Image: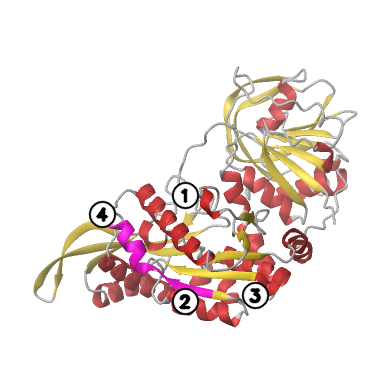
């Protein structure tokens, strides 16, 4: 089945993925592409959205794509930079704003019977974030909405289905943002809302059967949501020809290797557990740099995985649980080298000697969509509700070098923290939680004796997709009980702190 697709051209906005998620929430399929890499098969898209971005259209280096095959040929919505772009290069005037236009404001004027603002009233709250503003509308531009400070908050170009808005409908602060996107995509662009978890499963299983045929596929399971949902999809498609390998890198949570293996066997999957803890710890001995730790773990994982894959006769495919944010983050918006925040576990970097074709059944989905797809296949809530856990495991939660003793200490601390979250009914209210072993000792007192032992930090965040995250305001009583239990039960720890940093500016993990 061919879905009606929406193209989002990314000009580097921190909110671009949010636009895509809002569109997907309307059960409409969309793809993000860098502004300078417009897909050649443009006619396969039914509408185009231009994202915001940090550039000024007045700068010589301003992003300036050729929209000649888009504008006037299909519905087009420019958001923030996108709206200013449509004005600046089409006879309008964009100038520095007299006042800083940032944060919440309200629509003070909406043109009567304007389709883009159907079911949206004056007074509706919108979110602004720009330093330039549209002073004069583009040629044939008609004003359709204003705020108190921004006269040209929205416009349409006569004779075209081309719209520009200077606010961000994709963020939660724009109260009727979802309605505006629905007006544009469903009522103006006439796009069917047929992108559902059920349709994704049916089409993906069919596509996997056509792609793989009778070939054998090997998949590295991690115990997480993504690889588990990928495994069930492949199992539906090819059954016994799927061979799953679950590697214990010695950096998993306490007792996780055994409990996850048991869970997988209950799901009917063909899984082999491989305990390679010693091999990983040996490769990490004396390594403190976070990127070098990730690379060492990645290298050993590939070696172990390759050893196991070679034992499966005639395997042709390697399946991965890559999801859409992994794909987007691996392509920079400017087309140049994007800053390496962390090396991705899933995308690229596979050695030539694996010589396997790649299959990625989830590469079109965001994390929340992966969970919905899993739920539509009646997967165990215990797996679908699991917090994300980093590929390198506890190695990037132990700051400094890794030893078996440090892993033991952190596993014990982590087990108490996670178990208490469940006991206090807080686990499902948190997106991700974990403990970090700090490379500092501090003085303490136990009984009448002075101690000089490790400090651990607890981290709990709420998020939708990990792109941004806020620290969770856990109850003081919970933190007090958990801290006491950790210090009393975990030998080697005498101090517990709670991390109250949000992302940005901090990352979720410390390394």
Q: Which residue is drawn at 54% across and 57% down?
A: 463
Instruction: Give the tally of numbered discs.
Output: 4
- x%, y% of residue 207? 77, 60
Residue 384 versus residue 348 in the image, above or below: below
- Which is in the foreground here, disc 4 or disc 3? 4
Relative to 357, does residue 269 appear above or below in the rendering? below
- CA separation in Å, label 3 and label 2: 20 Å
Q: Are marks 1 and 4 in contact (CB under 8 Å)?
A: no
Mark 4 and mark 2: Cα distance apart in space: 35 Å
Q: Mark 1 points at which residue?
A: 503
Contact check, label 2 and label 1, Cβ < 8 Å: no
Query: For mark 4, what is the residue?
Result: 286
Asked where in the image residue 453 lies, by quadrant, the reply is bottom left
- Work out how far the residue at label 1 is from the one at label 3, CA to CA, in angstroms: 30 Å
Say which of marks 3 and 2 sits in front: 3
Stretch in magenta = 272-285
Task: First in sequence, mark 3 or 2: give its number.
Answer: 3
Q: Residues within 10 Å of mark 2 (few under 14, many from 20)?
A: few
**Circle nearer the N terminus (4, 2):** 4
Can you tell which of label 1 and label 3 is closer to the viewer? Answer: 3
The residue sitting at 57% across, 41% down in the picture is 14
Residues marked 3 and 2 touching at CB (< 8 Å): no
User: Residue at the location (33% across, 70% down)?
Assistant: 413
Who comes first in sequence, dot 4 or dot 3?
4
Mark 1 vs mark 4: in front? 4
The furthest residue to the right = 159
Question: In this view of the protein, can residue 356 be seen by the observer?
Answer: yes
Q: Where is residue 39 in the image (x, y as percent from the top left)?
A: 74, 37
């Amino acid at each position: 089945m061919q879905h009606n697709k929406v193209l989002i051209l990314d000009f580097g906005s921190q909110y671009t993925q949010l636009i895509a998620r809002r569109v997907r929430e309307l059960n409409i399929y969309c793809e993000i592409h860098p502004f300078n890499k417009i897909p050649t098969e443009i006619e396969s898209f039914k509408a185009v959205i231009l994202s915001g971005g940090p550039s000024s259209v007045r700068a010589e280096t301003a992003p300036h794509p050729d929209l000649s095959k888009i504008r006037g040929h299909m519905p087009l919505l420019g958001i923030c930079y996108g709206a200013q772009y449509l004005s600046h290069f089409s006879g309008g005037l964009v100038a520095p704003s007299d006042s800083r236009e940032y944060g919440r404001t309200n629509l003070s004027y909406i043109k009567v019977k304007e389709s883009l603002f159907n079911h949206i009233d004056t007074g509706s709250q919108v979110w602004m974030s720009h330093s330039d503003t549209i002073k004069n509308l583009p040629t044939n531009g008609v004003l359709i909405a204003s705020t108190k400070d921004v006269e040209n908050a929205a416009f349409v170009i006569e004779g075209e289905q081309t719209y520009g808005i200077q606010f961000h409908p994709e963020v939660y602060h724009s109260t009727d943002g979802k309605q505006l996107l629905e007006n544009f995509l469903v009522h103006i662009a006439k796009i069917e809302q047929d992108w559902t978890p059920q349709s994704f499963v049916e089409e993906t299983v069919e596509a996997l059967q056509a792609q793989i045929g009778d070939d054998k596929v090997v998949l590295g399971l991690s115990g997480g949501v993504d690889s588990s949902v990928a495994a069930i999809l492949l199992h539906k498609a090819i059954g016994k020809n799927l061979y799953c390998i679950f590697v214990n890198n010695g950096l998993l949570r306490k007792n996780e290797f055994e409990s996850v293996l048991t869970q997988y066997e209950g799901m009917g999957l063909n899984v082999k557990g491989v305990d390679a803890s010693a091999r990983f710890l040996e490769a990490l001995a004396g390594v403190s740099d976070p990127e070098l730790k990730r690379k060492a773990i990645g290298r050993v994982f590939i070696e172990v995985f390759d050893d196991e894959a070679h034992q499966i006769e005639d395997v042709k495919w390697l399946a991965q649980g890559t999801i859409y944010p992994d794909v987007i983050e691996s392509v920079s918006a400017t087309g140049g080298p994007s800053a390496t925040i962390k090396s991705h576990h899933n995308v690229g970097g596979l050695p030539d000697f694996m010589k396997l074709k790649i299959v990625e059944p989830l590469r079109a989905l965001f994390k929340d969509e992966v969970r919905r797809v899993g739920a539509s296949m009646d997967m165990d809530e215990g797996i679908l509700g699991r917090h994300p856990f980093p590929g390198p495991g506890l190695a990037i939660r132990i700051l400094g070098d890794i030893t078996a003793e440090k892993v033991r200490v952190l596993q014990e601390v982590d087990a108490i923290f996670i178990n208490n979250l469940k006991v206090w009914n807080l686990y499902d209210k948190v997106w991700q939680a974990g403990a970090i072993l700090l490379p500092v000792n501090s003085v303490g007192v136990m009984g009448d004796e002075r101690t000089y032992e490790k400090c651990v930090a607890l981290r709990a965040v709420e998020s939708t997709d990990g792109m941004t995250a806020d620290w969770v305001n856990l109850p003081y009583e919970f933190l007090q009980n958990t801290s006491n239990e950790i210090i009393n039960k975990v030998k080697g720890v005498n101090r517990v702190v709670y991390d109250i940093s949000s992302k940005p500016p901090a990352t979720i993990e410390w390394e």
